[in-house]
Image: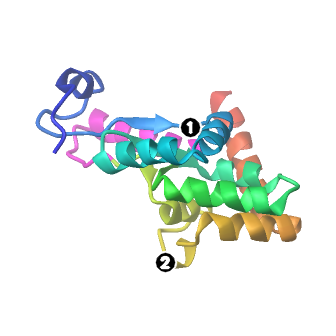
């Protein structure tokens, strides 16, 4: 169990005695650069060692897959999707879902109700389910390459995601007044 940096976990407001691994969010550019560099076996071994050590948890979002599906070269897009999965990432919930959790938890704190905070990063299947307004389900436990391949071959199928993202953006705009 990792016990370094206790000041960092305390400064983030985490309960004392709990250990949290550093989360590293990779934007699409960083992910592309890392994937390109990881073609070198030595570099890839180093990346794998850091991830296996548990010192870093990579975080991505469903938007990474949407952006990857906008590539014109299917093989490169599939390779990037497989690289994403090889990092064993956690998946960031969409902003609207995070905002809902923030509001709920603020209310519980205000009402002085004990509660267990919900994580903002989760499994891919739970993040996809949340995006669609559903619970985590094995039906969403689909390799990233399958999402990307399907969306490249059938771009009309991203319509559901486009509506969800558009709805999230509109809700955020409305909420910010």
The answer to whether residue 110 is above or below residue 129 is above
**Residue appearing at x 87%, y 64% in the figure:** 155
Residue 82 can be seen in this image: yes
Nearest to the observer: residue 160 or residue 25: 25
Say which mark, if any, is on residue 26.
Answer: 1
Q: Earlier in the sequence, mark 2 or mark 1?
A: 1
**Residue appearing at x 62%, y 41% in the figure:** 31
The answer to whether residue 147 is above or below residue 171 is below
Question: In the image, is 151 to the left or to the right of 1?
Answer: right
* Residue found at the far bottom of this picture: 139
Name the residue tied to disc 2.
Answer: 138
The answer to whether residue 172 is above or below residue 77 is above
Residue 103 magenta-drawn? Answer: yes
Q: Which residues are magenta?
A: 94-117
Query: What percent of the width, then of the height, locates residue 111?
Result: 27, 38
Query: What percent of the width, then of the height, locates residue 53?
Result: 29, 46
Element carrying mark 2:
helix
The answer to whether residue 96 is above or below residue 74 is above
Element carrying mark 1:
loop
Question: In the image, is 5 to the left or to the right of 82?
Answer: left
Q: Quadrant of the N terminus?
A: top left
Foreground mark, 2 or 1?
1
| Location of residue 106 by image quarter | top left
Question: In the image, is 111 to the left or to the right of 56?
Answer: left
Query: What percent of the width, then of the height, locates residue 108?
Result: 30, 41
Q: Are marks 2 and 1 in contact (CB under 8 Å)?
A: no
Say which mark, if any, is on residue 8.
Answer: none
Residue 139 magenta-drawn? Answer: no
**Residue appearing at x 51%, y 58% in the figure:** 86
Query: What percent of the width, then of the height, locates residue 146?
Result: 68, 71
């Amino acid at each position: 169990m990792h016990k370094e940096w206790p000041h960092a976990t305390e400064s983030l407001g985490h309960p004392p005695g709990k250990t949290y691994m550093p989360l590293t969010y990779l934007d699409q550019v960083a992910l592309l650069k890392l994937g390109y560099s990881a073609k070198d076996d030595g570099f890839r071994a180093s990346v794998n060692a850091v991830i296996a050590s548990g010192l870093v948890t990579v975080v991505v979002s469903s938007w990474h897959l949407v952006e990857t599906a906008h590539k014109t070269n299917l093989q490169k897009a599939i390779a990037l999707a497989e690289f994403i999965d090889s990092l064993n990432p956690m998946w960031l919930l969409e902003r609207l879902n995070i905002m809902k959790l923030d509001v709920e938890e603020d209310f519980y704190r205000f009402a002085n109700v004990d509660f267990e905070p919900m994580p903002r990063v989760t499994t891919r299947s739970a993040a996809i389910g949340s995006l669609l307004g559903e619970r985590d389900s094995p039906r969403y436990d689909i390799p990233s390459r399958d999402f990307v391949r399907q969306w490249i071959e059938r771009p009309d199928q991203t319509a559901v995601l486009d509506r969800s993202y558009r709805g999230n953006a509109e809700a955020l705009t409305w909420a910010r007044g």
